Image (tube, helix red, strand yellow):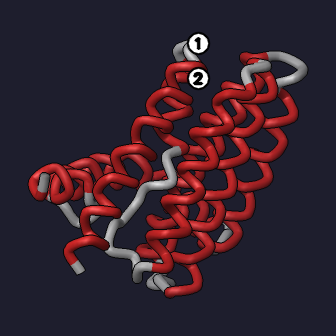
Amino acid sequence: MKSLLTLIQRDSSVHQNIRKYKDRLFTPAAKMCVRLGVNPYGVSIIGLLIGLVSLGLLFVNYWYFVIGIVISTIIDGIDGNVARITNQITPQGKKLDFAVDLTLSLLTYSVLVIWLEEPLWIIGLNLFGLVLLLNKLAGSPLRIFPGRLWIVLFVVVGLPRWGLVVITLYAVSMYALLMTDIARS
């Protein structure tokens, strides 16, 4: 169980390798933002706004929603690069980035539940929210990913239900790991 926890943590070697490739991919766009005078906070807010607009587009055209949520997710990957390039890495920026990602994760999940007209999935959303809350109250022993990327990956290939399944299973596994960690304490 410990190796699974180590594997999924943000400071794991798997995460570091993913970040290395992500940085290579997003650095040119981040440099363009810097040249245009957009700071990391601005990049995060732009990503949030595009994400919010894309959620409304789901009820107009599924593929417009897909394009918007993908653009928003890409922008979410750029803000950290802009912060590193401009040497503006701050605790507030990390909190804003996490808040934007969490907000769009939960809203995307919620809007998909409404759009699919399958209210049973709200159980998974509630469990995910409970895990995040309990983790915070326990002093954040788990570094939990908000999960938007997983939903987006399934949405892009036209399988939004599978995105909800994955997030629900992730929430269940995080709940089990969190309860195990709390029980050991």
What element does badge 2 sit on?
helix
Task: Inspect the image, locate mark 1, and give the three-letter code of the amino acid beneath it.
Answer: Gly
Q: What residue do we see at 26% from left, 60% from top?
A: 9
**Residue 26 location (% of width, % of height):** 44, 50
Q: What residue do we see at 74% from left, 28% from top?
A: 119
* Quadrant assignment for the C terminus: bottom left
Instruction: Looking at this view, name the residue that lies furthest to the front.
Output: 183
What element does badge 1 sit on?
loop
Name the residue carrying label 2. Answer: 155
| Local crowd size for mark 2, using a 10 Å CA cut-off: few (<14), some (14–19), many (≥20) | many
Name the residue carrying label 1. Answer: 158
For the question of whether residue 38 can be seen, the reply is yes
Label number found at residue 52: none
Q: In which quarter of the view is residue 115 placed?
A: top right
The residue nearer to you, when weighing 95 against 166, is 166
Q: In which quarter of the view is residue 36 placed?
A: bottom right
The number of numbered discs placed on residues in the rendered structure image is 2
The residue nearer to you, when weighing 132 against 147, is 132
Task: Inspect the image, locate mark 2, and give the three-letter code of the amino acid beneath it.
Answer: Val
Q: CA distance from mark 1 to mark 2?
A: 5 Å
Q: Left or right? Give the position of 112 relative to 76.
A: right
Q: Is residue 40 above or below residue 30?
A: below
Q: Left or right? Give the position of 61 relative to 92.
A: right
State if disc 2 and disc 1 touch (CB < 8 Å): yes
Q: Left or right? Give the position of 129 relative to 52.
A: left
Q: Left or right? Give the position of 94 relative to 182.
A: right
**Residue 99 location (% of width, % of height):** 63, 67
Q: What residue do we see at 39% from left, 76% from top?
A: 140
**Residue 176 location (% of width, % of height):** 32, 52
**Residue 143 location (% of width, % of height):** 36, 66
For the question of whether residue 37 can be seen, the reply is no
Q: What residue do we see at 29% from left, 57% from top?
A: 177
